[in-house]
Image (cartoon, helix red, strand yellow):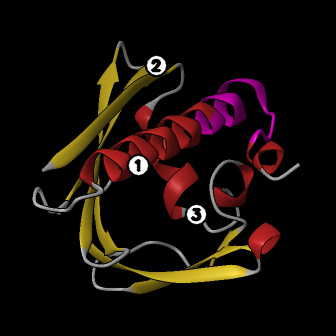
Amino acid sequence: MKNITKMKILKPTHEVFEAFVDPLKIGNFWFSSSSERWEQGKTITLRYDEYDAKGDIEIIEVVTNKKLVFKWNEGYIVTITLEELNNSDTIIQVIEEGFNENDDELILKLVDNKEGWVYMLTCLKGYLEYGVNLRVALVK
């Protein structure tokens, strides 16, 4: 079982890619902070200061400006792909897989997961296209 979420960002792929891998940028749309630059083979600590929470992700694959793959949250695998359009826009796709189809709460988990990815991509779009930080509104 997997969940697929896509969005068009009106920025080039290198800007979208850097928003994820640069620890100084990720706090503008997703987590409060990232312990270091995302690179293949590294374990990165992500923090949500608003919830006093943190978690680690294992970076499995990095293809500059094209793909990020990581493992997190009970072994789920997330693949983020970037497709450049017209040298100026990007289609970003997030696929999360590893859901147990026999789980009694599968539908609830898939819906909750989808909501999270849609919210994150919306915050990414707001940050990159308009310079606003929508992420903090989640808690307020």
Q: Quadrant of residue 84?
A: top left
Mark before the other along the chain sequence, 3 or 2 = 3
Total numbered labels: 3
Q: Is residue 113 left or right of residue 98?
A: right
The percent coordinates of residue 48 (x first, y second) are 70, 70
Q: Secondary structure at mark 2?
A: loop
Mark before the other along the chain sequence, 1 or 2 = 2
Task: Find disc 2 in the rendering and name its residue.
Answer: 88
The percent coordinates of residue 87 (x first, y second) are 39, 19
Q: Is residue 132 above or below residue 89?
A: below
* Dominant secondary-structure state across the stretch colored magenta: helix
Q: Secondary structure at mark 3?
A: loop
Disc 3 marks which amino acid?
A: Asp
The percent coordinates of residue 89 (x first, y second) are 44, 19
* Real-space CA distance between mark 1 and mark 2, rounded to the nearest whole angstrom: 29 Å
Which residue is at a point 30% across and 69% down the rendered structure image? Answer: 70
| The residue stretch that appears in magenta | 123-134
| Mark 2 Cα-neighbour bin, 10 Å: few <14, some 14–19, many ≥20 | few
Q: Is residue 48 left or right of residue 90?
A: right
Q: Secondary structure at mark 1?
A: helix
Q: Is residue 69 above or below residue 10?
A: below
Task: Find disc 1 in the rendering and name its residue.
Answer: 113
Frontmost of labels 1 and 3 is: 1
Disc 2 marks which amino acid?
A: Ser
Which residue is at a point 46% across and 19% down the rendered structure image? Answer: 88
Which residue is at a point 42% across and 35% down the rendered structure image? Answer: 13
Indicate yes or no whether the magenta region holds residue 102.
no
Decide which of 89, 133 is in the foreground and name it. 133
Residue furthest front as drawn: 104
Q: Is residue 89 above or below residue 38?
A: above
